[in-house]
Image (cartoon, grey):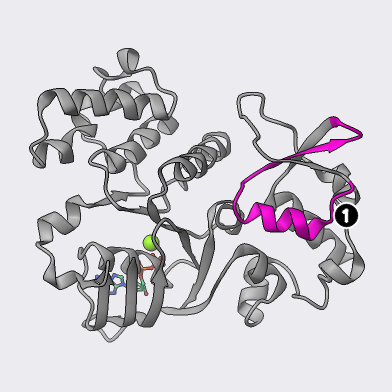
Amino acid sequence: MIRFQNVTKEYEDGVKAVDSLTIEIKEGEFFVFIGPSGCGKTTTLKMINRLIDSTRGETYIKEKNIHEYNIHELRWNIGYVLQQIALFPHMTIEENIAIVPELKKWSREKVSKRVDELLEMVGLDPETFKKRKPGELSGGQQQRIGVIRALAADPDIILMDEPFSALDPISREKLQHDIADLQKRIRKTIVFVTHDMQEALALGDRIGIMQDGRLIQADTPENLIKNPANDFVKEFIGSRGPETLPFKEKEIFIKDLTGKLEQADPAFEYTKVMDTETRLDEAIKELAVTDAIAIEQNGNPIGILTSKTIVRYLAEREGA
Ligand code: ADP
Ligand code: MG
């Protein structure tokens, strides 16, 4: 779907913000780029919709070089969500969401239907919110509008640059649930940037770890935890790698983590349920595609298992 082939971005001052990036992001995939500040995540994202042009290498979308697309068409077919809430303050919520559909000359009726549908999709009542200005919404609600605005004209690809990092932890977790859930239903190709490993593990089908402009490892959350490519990756994941994390050999079960489980969010519908007698590596496999698993003991719900629970458990084991 999106293929970087030896892509480099070198600034005038000689800084290689991105260095020989080669990766293919698959259609319908939720791909997360993660790495410390300055490692080239934003530059990578902006090269997809050509807000930044590469200095070397080629980028393809659906096997067509991005330079062969009409630039407006390219941008309209790629949704973009920024870290700072970037809604236009003088426009209503409806007008903000409708920007790209209107550029694409959708009929008034179609636009209005789409706005209602999107607001409902993220649990905001259209009648209540449509005519409001961004300033009349909370930060979490505004960022939710930022997300659906990027979806408005039904783009194939959505780019998200640390979209939740300015939010408080509760809104942040709620939006992480929303976006994971949304992705399951609409199956867009999402390229998501974060510097938060918990967020990456919770959301990514695959995670690409970057350092100094280079992609160090791209893999599923499970494989990153089990087979980190080097010390940098290990450190980033917060573990010392497979020799200290012998999932299969030591036969760890969910029941070993019961004291660490989180409380269920009554507003969230957990679709995946596992018993405490299930092996932890089964749960890890599931967490590559689900962000939370409801755990039962003798048929009774006792808590929620997330990637965060596991990382916390492993971190403690390691210290022991
Ligand atoms: P990240 O999003 O991972 O924090 P960026 O992609 O924004 O990283 O930046 C990668 C590197 O490129 C950094 O060293 C940054 O200072 C540098 N950089 C970004 N934009 C410019 C620019 N316009 N001119 C020169 N250097 C830049
Ligand atoms: Mg950035």
Q: Position of residue 78 (x, y in %)?
A: 25, 53
Q: Is mark 1 on a helix, strand or loop?
A: loop
Under mark 1, the amino acid is: Phe
Q: Mark 1 points at which residue?
A: 253
Q: Where is residue 275 in the image (x, y as percent from the top left)?
A: 84, 42
Residue at position x 92%, y 34% in the image: 298
Q: Position of residue 285 (x, y in %)?
A: 69, 58
Taking the image as shown, residue 286 lies to the left or right of residue 99, namely right
Q: Quadrant of residue 253?
A: bottom right
Taking the image as shown, residue 160 lies to the left or right of residue 66, namely right
Residue at position x 40%, y 29% in the image: 121
Question: Is residue 92 in view from this perspective?
Answer: no
In the rendered image of this protein, does residue 195 appear above or below residue 258? below
Q: In which quarter of the image is ligand 1?
A: bottom left
Quarter of the C terminus within the rendering:
bottom right
Residue at position x 34%, y 33% in the image: 145
Residue situated in front as seen by the camera: 92 or 221:
221
Residue situated in front as seen by the camera: 195 or 285:
285
Q: Quadrant of residue 288?
A: bottom right
Q: Give the range drawn in magenta.
A: 277-300
Quarter of the N terminus within the rendering:
bottom left
Q: Does the magenta stretch include residue 302?
A: no
